Every structure is written in structure tokens, then in C-alpha cells.
Image: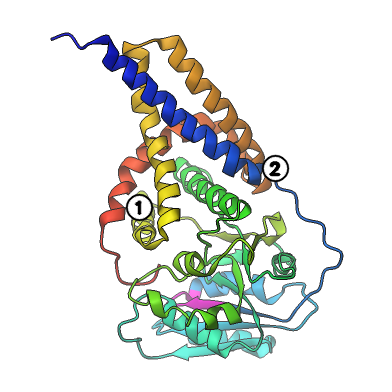
Amino acid sequence: MMIPPIIWEIVFIAFCVVIAIQVFYYLFFFSRLAAYQVPLKQQNQEQPVSIIICARDEADNIVKNLPGVLVQDYKTTHEIILVNDNSVDESKYIIDEFKKSFKNLNHIELTQEAKMIPGKKFPLSMGIKSAKYETLLLTDADCVPASELWIQKMQDGYDAGTEIVLGYGAYHKKSGLLNKLIRFETFHTALQYLSYALAGLPYMGIGRNLSYKREVFIKNKGFSSINHVPSGDDDLFINQVATKQNTSIVIDADAHTLSEPKQSWKAWMQQKFRHYTTSKYYKGKHKFLLGLYSCSFFFIYPLLAVSIIFYCWWLALAVFGLRLLIQAIIWFFSMKKLNEKDLWPWFLFLDIWMFIYYLIFVPALWKKPQKGWS
């Protein structure tokens, strides 16, 4: 049975539509991060800060990463609150040793599990409740600041009316394909949430590097509306409280945090499945925008292949090439700004990888969130 030529024409038109959608996202949203310049401030005013870190059985990470937080070059009053959540390793004794040398380190020892509140929300709430200062700066025990100016640079994001500052949490650069894919996925996620914030549509932040005012937490009644979700102490909370007026970003390389990437494909996939199960709770407009972008991205290569084989190969490649050129330019400048420019030579491979990535992780949207720490 011969398929009518009009079918292939419809396929090509569909291909052009998804390319047009992609070009819109890159020019309207993602170009904002690529072209971002730090706003000039008439004066920088440092403010007292409470840094909050939650840990569970992370003695090795505390030994390795906590010194990077403790030796920050920040002249204004600040405290470090380390919430040790039911650890059974030697974390308590290590923290007590650090306290002997650093008087601004406060240790909260939790010895009972919070009923009906899975994940990290209860220990984080306890840390926020005990904070002395209005400005909170959050990170994880497996993260280390990229510089001694981390606190200062993150606080530079505050201005009149700012209540939330979104930062970038990178991963250590190592050899191997898995490391590149982990770092690219982190970059690609940041490209979206930072660009959306610049466009006045903030929808998430990452707990590895996030700052907000305690008043925002109190006004929202903490995590009470999302306590039933195991994860989401960062992205779901920001999704609820962030607005165009109260949110800013900081992407200075000195303001990044660095984490140790997963060492196996299985561990990384489990981590990503756990994270993606929270996106179903985002606001409707955010789910629509993120879903439209992902769907259009996913259909590019199948429609390209059919258009090349059955319609007009040079026309299909020309349309695809336009999108690829725009994408390459925006990725280059965005990767440069986020200190990930070594990934750019891989951009065509990484673009193809995203098709496989969506195949693997889309099922997570329908899975029940796993209980436990995110």
C-alpha cells in the first residue's frame, strides 16, 4: 500500500512546528541567560546570614566539605547550622571536634524520625527555626563552596524587594562519559530555571545552593503544604513562593557550589528518577511550559529522520541546521557563564543524547515518589 505524499508533507510541517517551538524557547527564554550581565548596584550591603546544612550519615562529606563553609571570607556576622538527622555513623563526634575551633558552628542533633514527614523537610525546618538571622543560605553536606567568597557573592543577589536568590550547584569535573552527561544535565536544568527566572517566571531552585528570607518560609507556613512529598524541599517550595518581583539569580563562578557526581549509571538514574517525581506538583503554567519544551525536543529527531527519508532531505537539514546554530550559540555563552564551557565541543552529541534522556526518564513523571532523602 503506497502512503500518499501528503502524509510526508504533514510530517515535515510537524517537524517545522517543533523546530519553531524550540527556536522560540531559545530566543525568548534561554538567550536571557546567555546574554546575562550582573546588574550594577549602587552599594553592596552585607547582612547577617544563617547557613543551614542537613546531614544524615555523611561523616566523610562533613570532613571533606564543611571546612570550605567554615573558612568563608565574610566579615559580617554569620552562623553555620548543621542539622544531624538521626545519623548512626560518627558524624556527631566529628561535628563536635569542629565546634572546638569554630564558635559560629551550631549543631542540632535529631534523634527521632518525624512522623508522616518523609525526606529532608523536617530537619531543614528545625534548622530554619533555630536560625538567628533573617537571611538563610542553604547547601548540602556533599557540597563545597567553589570559593571563599561564596557567602558574599550569593548575598550580592539581594536588593530591595528580593526575597529569594537562586544559585548554581555544579559537579566536580572528572574524566569519563558519565561525568559529562551528569554535568550537562545539571547545566541544562540550570539553563531552564535560571532563564525562566530572568523572564519573570521562576519555578524552582536547588537545595545545593539556594538563599531566601526566613519571612518567606514563615509566611508559607514552612513546608506544610508539601510535607506529604518525600522530596521538593527546594524545587517545590520555590515553585510555591517565587515571583517575578521577589526572585533574583547569581551565577558568578565564585558563588557556585561543587558536589561529587555519582560514580555509576544506576546511582545517577535512581537520583534523577527521584527528582523528577516532584515535577508533577508544579504549578500548571510551569508544567505546560516545561512539558511543551520537552515534547518538542523529544520529537525533533524522529521527525527529522522521516522528513529526510520520505520528504526532502536538504530542506529538512536546513530547518534543523537553523535551530542547531541558534542552540550552539546560546549553549556556548551560557556554558561559559556557568563555567561548563568544556562541554560545548560535545554539543551535537549532547543534543542527540537528550532524545535518549527523555526516553529514559519520562516514565518518572508517573511514578510514586520514593520515601527518603533526596
- Mark 1 element type: helix
Residue 56 appearing in the image: no
Q: Which mark is residue 367?
A: none
Q: Is residue 291 visible?
A: yes
The residue where tag 1 is placed is 269
Residue at 26 percent of width and 58 percent of height: 367
Q: What amino acid type should be assigned to the residue bearing mark 2?
A: Ala
| Amino acid type of the residue tagged 1 in the rendering | Met
Question: How much space separates mark 1 and mark 2, taking CA atoms?
Answer: 32 Å
Residue numbers of the magenta segment: 52-59
| Residue drawn at x 49%, y 34% as measured from the top left | 22
- 67 sits left or right of 356 in the view: right
From the viewer's side, name the closer residue of 54 and 161. 161
157 or 91, nearer to the observer: 157
Q: Is residue 3 above or below residue 218?
A: above
Q: Residue furthest left?
A: 1
Which of the pair 313/341 is nearer the observer?
313
Location of residue 279 in the rendering, given as x and y in whole percent from the top left corner: 38, 58
Q: Which residue is mark 2?
A: 35
Answer whether residue 58 is magenta in the image: yes
Q: Earlier in the sequence, mark 1 or mark 2?
A: 2
Is label 2 in a helix, a strand or a loop? loop
Which image quarter: residue 73?
A: bottom right
